[in-house]
Image (spheres, helix red, strand yellow):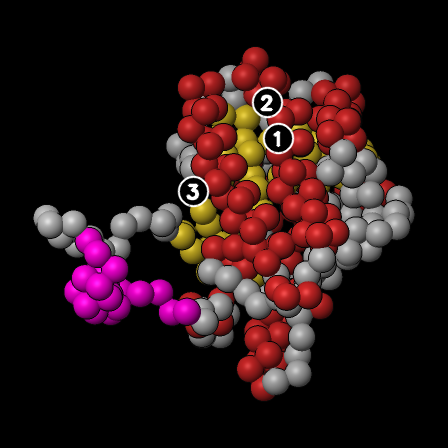
Amino acid sequence: MGGMLEGKVVAVTGAGRGIGREVALLCAREGAAVVVNDPGVAQGGDGGDAGPAQGTVDDIVAAGGKAWANLASVADPAGAATIIEDAVQRFGRIDAVVNNAGILRDSIWHKMSYEDWTSVIDVNLTGAFNVSKAATPYFREQQSGSFIHFTSTSGLIGNVGQANYSAAKLGLVALSHSIALDMARWGVRSNCIAPFAWSRMTASIPAETPAQKERVERLKAMSADKIAPLVAFLASDAAKEVNNQIFSVRKNEIVLFSKPRPARSMINLEGWTPASIAEELVPAFKPSFARADEVTAHVFPYDPV
């Protein structure tokens, strides 16, 4: 019996390790042919190794599936285009793009360099643009397709020492939103997932204070394979009515995030002055202010289930 992705072709970036690898393996088990993209770079984006991508491909083929390794960098528009070209040339079409590729160059804000900023934006945000743009003509022509972008609670909520990564991941939500609006007329969907999982990316989180150690232990309880089922669903025809959403997966829990919407409003018919803002507006708004130091642990303080 075929799976939910029988006959589909899925491209997964950053699929040599971690979440991307688990996504590629499950999509293949569900019947998809998979283009496994991964240049095999280090966590900070340096170096290169064909082993991770080819290892995922070998495991898919050994299990009776179809897969092809692509070693391009998503940060390079021409390289990103080869990911989609490989899908079409090797398997005849492209049905879903999973923008999972990412790097980290964490640094506290006052020490973050321009290179730290641009390198993370180039891979995590512009890379998703490059791959999505390459797939768009095919999606338009066939009037179907699914974009699945990996955002992060670092962008949705915030995290210390990740201004570059947080900006890229929240920018990815805005990109997904715009793609969903622009491409809906052709039956193309675009959704985001913020994953909770222990991987090479999260292994770099500091674990010095008791609070940090507790956070790391929670992450270790959440394996990468828990993320894959939602990705496979969103890539399938069963998700044809799911568009322009932000999900999160936390072990066996799936969360739907809201988008920013007005929280409070106050009108002064005489017009606002700096003094009236201080004396009237701030006291009225203050109970609804977001917590200034809020990070993911404040929003999800409970153990993963």
Q: Which amino acid does label 2 sit on?
A: Thr
What's the magenta region? 272-292
Mark 1 crowd level (few <14, some 14–19, many ≥20, 10 Å Cα): many
SS assignment at label 3? loop
Residue, x 27% and y 50% (percent of image)? 262
Residue, x 51% and y 17% (percent of image)? 143
Relative to residue 156, is residue 263 drawn left or right? left
Task: Give the image location of residue 165, x and y in percent.
Answer: 62, 54
Q: Name the residue under label 1.
A: 132
Q: Name the residue under label 2.
A: 136
The answer to whether residue 141 is above or below residue 204 is above
Q: Name the residue under label 3.
A: 245
CA–CA distance between discs 2 and 3? 19 Å
Q: Which amino acid does label 3 sit on?
A: Gln
Q: Can residue 41 be seen in this view?
A: yes
Question: Which one is earlier in the sequence, the residue at label 1 or at label 3?
Answer: 1
The answer to whether residue 199 is above or below residue 126 is below
Residue, x 50% and y 62% (percent of image)? 158
Which one is nearer the viewer's eye here, 125 or 292? 292
